[in-house]
Amino acid sequence: MKRIEAIIRKTKFEDVKEALLQSDIDWFEYHNVHGIGQSREERIYRGVQYSTDVIERVALTIVCRDQFVEPTVNVILKVAHTGEVGDGRIFVSDMIDTWSIRTGEHGDIVLRDKK
């Protein structure tokens, strides 16, 4: 099992969400997050100066079986891409185990099969 964590632009979240659901990813969690990037510019919008060093993004977390990692990552890469600095990052890490609270089962059996 793997855990996929993706940090993407807020403006791309709805598109990524729809693409994941269409590709049979049936569950993921997401959070609004703030980060600090390498760009530290001051910008002026409607006469108000503000800093661009704090970046608002959406963090997605998906846990899936190993065979679904590459297709899932490819969906995110394709849909979240703008070609601009700040498109985000994807992290993949190993999951040691998982349990179903309802049934007490553990292992990748608790993850539903793709339809």
Image: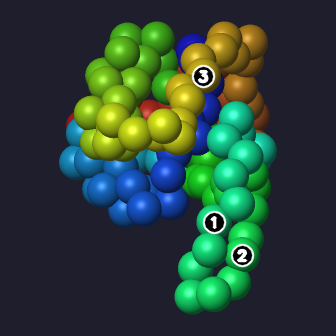
18 displayed left or right of 93: left
Q: Percent position (x, y) of residue 78?
A: 27, 33
First along the sequence among labels 2 and 3? 2
Disc nearer the start of the sequence (1/3): 1
| Mark 1–mark 3 distance (CA, rounded to whole Å) | 30 Å
Q: Position of residue 39 (x, y in %)?
A: 66, 41
Q: Nearer the viewer, mark 2 or mark 3?
A: 2
Q: Which mark is residue 43?
A: 1
Instruction: Specify the label residue 18 is tagged with.
Output: none
Question: Which secondary structure lies at badge 2?
Answer: strand
Q: Are marks 2 and 1 in contact (CB under 8 Å)?
A: yes
Q: Mark 1 packing: few (<14 Cα in 10 Å), some, or many (20+)?
A: few
**Residue at horizontal 75 percent and vertical 55 percent from the top:** 54
Which of the 4 quarters of the picture holds residue 1? top right
Residue type indicated by callout 3: Phe
Mark 2 vs mark 1: which is more N-terminal? 1
Residue 49 - label: 2
| Residue 83 percent coordinates (x, y) | 33, 35
Q: Nearer the viewer, mark 1 or mark 3?
A: 1
Q: How many marks?
A: 3
Q: How is the image coloured?
A: rainbow
Crowd around label 3: few <14 · some 14–19 · many ≥20 (10 Å): few
* Residue at the limit of the structure toward the bottom, as seen here: 46
Q: Which residue is label 3 attached to?
A: 91
For the residue marked with disc 2, what is the amino acid? Gln
